[in-house]
Image: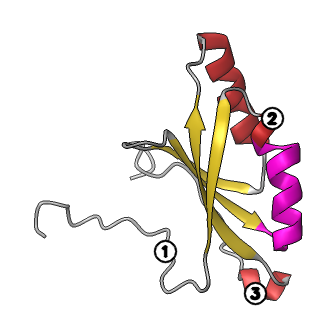
Amino acid sequence: MREEGYIKGQVALLDRKQLGDAIIVFATLKMAALSDKQREDFLRKIEITPEILECHTIFGERDIMIKVIAQSLEWYQKFIFKVVLKLPGVIDIVSTVTLSELKHTTAIPVRGFASV
């Protein structure tokens, strides 16, 4: 599978609880229209910000959804003002803080999606 390009890399999965308290926040961003240069800058800044675990484009009234790991709500508030609101094109943010994680996996079902 590695030679065919299915395996992109190997990682160690860390137990977040062992590393200390953390909260997970899903934030949806409303974006302004971006030039190609601004879009590249936005993507580069998302990529180099380790606290942003995932970033997705989405349908609907919002444009982007990010998954953030935060030390506390106070830390997250500072992160919003110092990092997220300074990203190119960000107009507005709506955040949802999770209470508990019921399932987390990085596994992708390889049996196929059509069999559901």
Check disc 3 and report the residue beneath it.
17
In front: mark 2 or mark 1? 2
Q: How is the image coloured?
A: secondary structure
- The image quadrant that residue 96 belongs to is bottom right
Q: Secondary structure at mark 3?
A: helix
Q: Is residue 99 left or right of residue 23?
A: left
Check disc 1 and report the residue beneath it.
105
Going by the numbered disc 3, the residue's amino acid type is Lys
Badges 3 and 1: C-beta atoms under 8 Å apart?
A: no
- Measure how far apart labels 2 and 1 are at the Cα level: 31 Å
Q: Is residue 27 left or right of residue 109?
A: right
Going by the numbered disc 2, the residue's amino acid type is Lys
Q: Which residues are magenta?
A: 70-84
Where the C terminus falls, by quadrant?
bottom left
Check disc 2 and report the residue beneath it.
86
Residue sitting at the far left = 115
